[in-house]
């Protein structure tokens, strides 16, 4: 992602309206996030300062956060020194991802005091530090002691020291024609050299510079550099880009040639970051809360796949039963030729006309040898029957856990408990200890609206799929599912939908499936009355007939426009 020095510069420019705003309240809703509620222009603005190792940032947020009843110590220190104060300056240091917010407030006896909030956006080394007018540290989010950090100490009472200098050049303080002196054109990888030379550049920025000319020479590089820098000063068009083939996501404060046309434009940087990090934050929370489920499902898949392989091998060996039966018959037919103590007999196979040599146990009588082979035949026959049954059960388990695995890639935090409960009911997870009865939560179905205004419902886990297919939908509603691919049940709540709506429902079925990132996904659809749940089948499993098949390619932007809400069942 490109929250680089250039992006920070634009963000600081957008935040200048907060100057002279009064700090009304300070909250710490999450372990690594501070929100300063600043009153300015007759409105409260939530300034979010985050030092999350992956999502460190600063922007105005419209999202409502739940605050802990007992505020952490860091929030208490901030409140003591900053609440009631006025924002006097918001400055970027050089072109780096370091921002200082100057605040003027009063202490307990009414004297004017000056405090500085320093935000260092440096990935896993990000930090938020409060210093006084003498640059002495009052408190730091992350404490760095001489034992843990050789470059500087971040502890209350110590003098604030800047992070180790990288000796990079501010790109806004250099003339375009001077760029060549910092680049070795014989070494190649101009983008990497620019990244290592200029302060605040990200790979996104340096790649953009080199893409603006077909070849990088001593003539074209200064041109591309100057053109890019000029654009960064003139433009402010917040954009989000996602490559649906690779899944890679990027955002920036202006349109870039490398994004092509596959972008979403936002009204402000704040709105862009709110939308982007809300989705990322949701995925992060899901990942944290469902991590054990993901591991469990993967373990179950591997276990059942290994079991299936062994069962198939055993099933192949069980096919030898016909030979055992043949040996028993031939021994019986030639019993007069066999004597106690013989270890084999060579006789004619009257089925094939070929001679066959049959091993014998010399300690057994001829009739006992025949009985031995008949017993082997019956044992293998029973074994083959049992193996066929076990193979069917194991394949069903694999399909079931593949379905759960697919569902885990699309769930929200609210869906996790439903999947846990299902796995408990199926005996895969331990049941919870009985507790006070709670009101059973309503099943939620994802709701979409087609271009023609029809409602399309999607089940995102097996409980939702069962409810949607077996209870919610009417017998003449159209039902969709990917052909032989784990996925969600999709239903159009209309007996006679248009062809466009059918295509859109098929697209949703393709998207909410294991093949969601593919194109031309086969999707079966039929009337609900042709969909049946076999007795004793696992949750979400159905059979169907009278289906038709069409091929769908998910259009992510179109799906997003269709999305409405979570619908109570």
Image: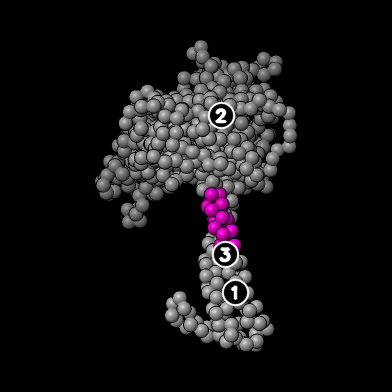
Question: Hey, which quadrant is residue 561 in on the image?
Answer: top left
Read off the magenta span: 381-397
Q: Are marks 3 and 2 in contact (CB under 8 Å)?
A: no
| Distance between mark 3 and mark 2 Cα atoms | 47 Å
Work out whether mark 3 precedes mark 1 in sequence or the reverse, and give the earlier one: 1
Q: Nearer the viewer, residue 179 or 81?
A: 81
Q: Which residue is mark 1?
A: 373
Residue 421 appears anywhere in the view: yes
Q: Which mark is residue 381?
A: 3
Q: Residue at x 35, y 56 (%)?
A: 187
Number of the label disc, if any, that sits on residue 339: none
Q: Secondary structure at mark 3?
A: helix
- Decide if residue 280 is on the left or right side of residue 142: left
| Cα–Cα span, label 3 and label 1 | 12 Å
Q: Which residue is mark 2?
A: 443
Q: Residues within 10 Å of mark 1 (few under 14, many from 20)?
A: many
Q: Earlier in the sequence, mark 3 or mark 2?
A: 3
Instruction: Please tell me whether mark 1 sits on a helix, a strand or a loop.
Output: helix
Q: Earlier in the sequence, mark 1 or mark 2?
A: 1
Q: Main secondary structure of the magenta part?
A: helix
**Is 544 placed above or below 76 here?**
below
Q: Quadrant of the N terminus?
A: top left
Above or below 496: residue 407: below
Q: Position of residue 242 (x, y in %)?
A: 39, 38
Vertical side of 365 occupied by 492: above or below: above
Residue 249 in sight here: no
Q: Nearer the viewer, mark 3 or mark 2?
A: 3
Front of the two marks 1 and 2:
1
**Is-magenta flag for residue 383?**
yes
The one of 32 and 7 positioned closer to us in this rendering: 32
């Amino acid at each position: 992602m490109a929250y680089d020095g250039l992006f920070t510069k634009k963000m600081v420019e957008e935040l200048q309206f907060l100057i002279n705003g009064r700090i009304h309240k300070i909250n710490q809703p999450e372990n690594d996030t501070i929100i300063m509620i600043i009153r300015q222009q007759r409105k409260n603005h939530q300034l979010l300062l985050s030092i999350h190792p992956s999502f460190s940032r600063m922007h105005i947020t419209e999202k409502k956060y739940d605050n802990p009843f007992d505020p952490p110590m860091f929030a208490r220190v901030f409140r003591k020194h900053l609440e009631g104060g006025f924002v006097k300056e918001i400055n970027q240091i050089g072109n780096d991802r370091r921002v200082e917010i100057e605040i003027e407030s009063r202490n307990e006896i009414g004297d004017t005091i000056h405090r500085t909030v320093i935000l260092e956006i440096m990935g896993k080394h990000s930090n938020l530090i409060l210093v006084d007018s003498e640059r002495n540290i009052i408190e730091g989010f992350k404490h760095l002691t001489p034992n843990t950090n050789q470059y500087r100490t971040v502890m209350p009472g110590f003098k604030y020291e800047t992070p180790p200098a990288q000796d990079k050049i501010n790109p806004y303080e250099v003339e375009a024609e001077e760029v060549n002196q910092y680049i070795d054109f014989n070494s190649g990888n101009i983008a990497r050299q620019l990244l290592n030379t200029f302060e605040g550049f990200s790979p996104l920025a340096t790649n953009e510079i080199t893409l603006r000319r077909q070849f990088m020479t001593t003539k074209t590089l200064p041109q591309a550099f100057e053109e890019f820098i000029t654009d960064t000063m003139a433009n402010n068009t917040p954009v989000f880009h996602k490559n649906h083939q690779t899944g890679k996501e990027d955002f920036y404060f202006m349109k870039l040639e490398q994004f092509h046309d596959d972008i979403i434009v936002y009204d402000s940087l704040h709105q862009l970051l709110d939308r982007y990090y809300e989705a990322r934050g949701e995925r992060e929370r899901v990942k944290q809360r469902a991590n054990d489920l993901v591991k469990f499902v993967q373990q179950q898949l591997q276990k059942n796949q290994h079991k299936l392989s062994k069962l198939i091998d055993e099933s192949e060996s069980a096919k030898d039963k016909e030979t055992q039966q043949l040996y028993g018959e031939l021994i019986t037919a030639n019993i007069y030729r066999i004597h106690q103590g013989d270890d084999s007999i060579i006789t004619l196979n009257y089925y094939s006309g070929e001679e066959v040599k049959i091993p014998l146990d010399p300690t057994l009588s001829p009739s006992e040898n025949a009985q031995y082979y008949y017993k082997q035949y019956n044992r293998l026959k029973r074994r083959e029957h049992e193996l066929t049954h076990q193979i069917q059960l194991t394949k069903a388990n694999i399909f079931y856990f593949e379905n759960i695995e697919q569902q885990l890639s699309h769930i929200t935090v609210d869906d996790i408990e439903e999947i846990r409960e299902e796995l408990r009911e199926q005996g895969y997870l331990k049941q919870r200890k009985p507790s006070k009865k709670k009101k059973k939560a309503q099943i939620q179905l994802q709701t979409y609206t087609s271009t023609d205004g029809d409602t399309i419902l999607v089940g995102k886990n097996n409980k939702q799929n069962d409810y949607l297919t077996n209870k919610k939908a009417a017998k003449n509603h159209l039902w969709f599912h990917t052909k032989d691919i784990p996925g969600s049940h999709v239903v159009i709540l209309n007996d006679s939908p248009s062809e466009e709506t059918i295509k859109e429902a098929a697209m949703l079925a393709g998207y909410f499936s294991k093949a969601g990132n593919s194109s031309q996904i086969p999707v079966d659809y039929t009337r609900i009355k042709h969909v049946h749940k076999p007795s004793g089948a696992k949750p979400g499993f159905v059979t169907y007939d009278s289906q038709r098949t069409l091929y769908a390619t998910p259009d992510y932007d179109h799906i997003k426009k269709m999305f409405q809400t979570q619908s109570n069942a």
